Image (spheres, helix red, strand yellow):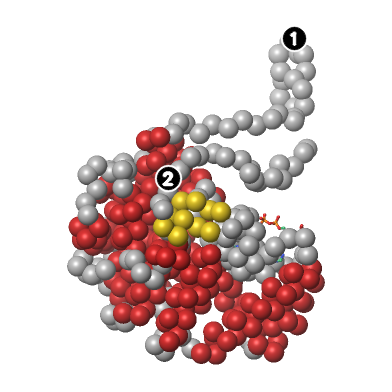
Amino acid sequence: MDKDDNGLEGVVAAHTVLSEVDGAAGRLVLRGHAVEDIAGRWRYEDVLALLWQDFFAPLPAASDLAQALGRARAEVATLLRADDRDVLADLPPVEAMRALLARLPDGDDLPTALRLVAAPVVFTAAVLRGKAGEAPVMPDAAAPHAADFLRMVSGRPATQAQAAALDAYLVTVADHGLNASTFAARVVASTGAGLASAVLAGLSALKGPLHGGAPGPVLDMLDAIGSADAAARWLEAALDRGERLMGFGHRIYRVRDPRADALKKALRELARVGGVEAGRVALAEAVERAALASLQARKPGRVLETNVEFYTALLLEAVGLPREAFTAVFAAGRVGGWVAHAREQVQRGRLIRPQSVYVGPAAEASPAGTSLP
Ligand code: ACO
């Protein structure tokens, strides 16, 4: 059978006002704003207000939206049950979140959308605390979203620098064209199934290692390498074994992923105030240099650059989030984009229904009817 090996590369499946991914120029624009101009300056709530405009009527001003999101966190926390700790403790956080998200009622309105954005942070924090044998910390509805997430995870208020770094991350990953999870969300939304179903589809697509599952393995790789001196040798051996280097390469970007630069900047900002272990940044930079040199030597015809996951790993580690939760934290950022795309699909699109080419055996003429093989 012929293999469909193009992965829909180059196929246009939607027109969107939400984000432009210019792979040739290495540029990501969110509704008229280059990602590097807003990451580190805007809070995640501000990006929701940007992405969701026109898709909910009426959409409150950004400050009111932030307060409504705080109330949604408190509401979602009431869906946690006393025995969740026992039932979910053995699951990776993203799998636990997949199970917990199913508790949210479906719908197409703003309250549904806000609960869906609130859920990943409330659930991830509760799951992480459950794994540590601790009770969940309840949301503070008046706190900013990123700061409240970190407080619910650790039980202590986050520093301003940590909250700002996490905000930079959530903003950076909020939307990214028609990536696999967003496409999945749009397909489900196009059937009229509702925002919660679309977000669940997005999450299911995100958790694969070729999409949102890479940042944890980036840290595993850094730990395995151990020191800057060992980087080149370790990476060459991994490539000799036919392995892929996590945090490098991208389907669309043919130059550097602009999100990697936005996150590297946020990480340096955190390091400036002592929020990152100095040796960790030095090791990461050495590994990045060695990896780019090895990949360029082995694949001269193809640009394999640092992608968003590489500095994501270091940033999320620095703000105190465990690597097993990284995919769930990615979902906490991308959910704003999934919701916006789902609304856009419903308002401006049609049922998504592509075609396949049949390459199986031809039907045989069988006058007496078909019998089972
Ligand atoms: N390490 C080593 N080799 C690589 C890497 C890598 N990270 N990425 C691509 N290559 C090689 C492939 O082996 C392939 O070589 P071949 O032509 O000899 O078979 C060639 O480069 C092209 O690779 P494709 O798989 O065709 O590239 P594609 O666009 O399909 O894949 C992907 C992109 C999946 C991101 C890939 O680069 C990869 O696996 N990277 C590592 C995982 C990762 O970092 N994922 C996060 C991506 S960012 C995000 O989703 C948010």
Q: Which of the 4 image quadrants contains residue 213?
A: bottom right
Q: Which of the 4 image quadrants contains residue 96?
A: bottom left
Is residue 98 rendered to the left or right of residue 207? Answer: left
Q: Position of residue 61 (x, y in %)?
A: 22, 54
* Quadrant occupied by the C terminus: top right
Mark 2 element type = loop
Q: Is residue 260 above or below residue 116?
A: below
Q: Residue at x 63, y 62 (%)?
A: 255
Q: Position of residue 39 (x, y in %)?
A: 41, 67
Q: In the image, is the residue at mark 1 within 8 Å of ligand 1 by its beta carbon? A: no
Q: Is residue 13 above or below residue 321?
A: above
Q: Amino acid at mark 1?
A: Pro
* Quadrant occupied by the N terminus: top right
Q: Residues within 10 Å of mark 2 (few under 14, many from 20)?
A: some
Find ligand 1 in the image and state its quadrant: bottom right
Q: Which of the 4 image quadrants contains residue 274?
A: bottom left
Label 2 or label 1, whichever comes before in sequence order: 2
Is residue 293 rendered to the left or right of residue 331? Answer: right
Q: CA distance from mark 2 to mark 1?
A: 55 Å
Is residue 293 rendered to the left or right of residue 20? Answer: right
Query: Which numbered dot is residue 221?
Result: none
The residue at the far top in this view is: 367
Frontmost residue, 117 versus 74: 117
The residue identified by callout 2 is 17
Mark 1 element type = loop
Residue 126 makes an appearance in the image: no
Q: Position of residue 177 (x, y in %)?
A: 50, 50
Residue 368 makes an appearance in the image: yes
Q: Is residue 283 above or below residue 184?
A: below
The residue identified by callout 1 is 367
Q: Position of residue 203 (x, y in %)?
A: 46, 54
Q: Residue at x 50, y 39 (%)?
A: 14
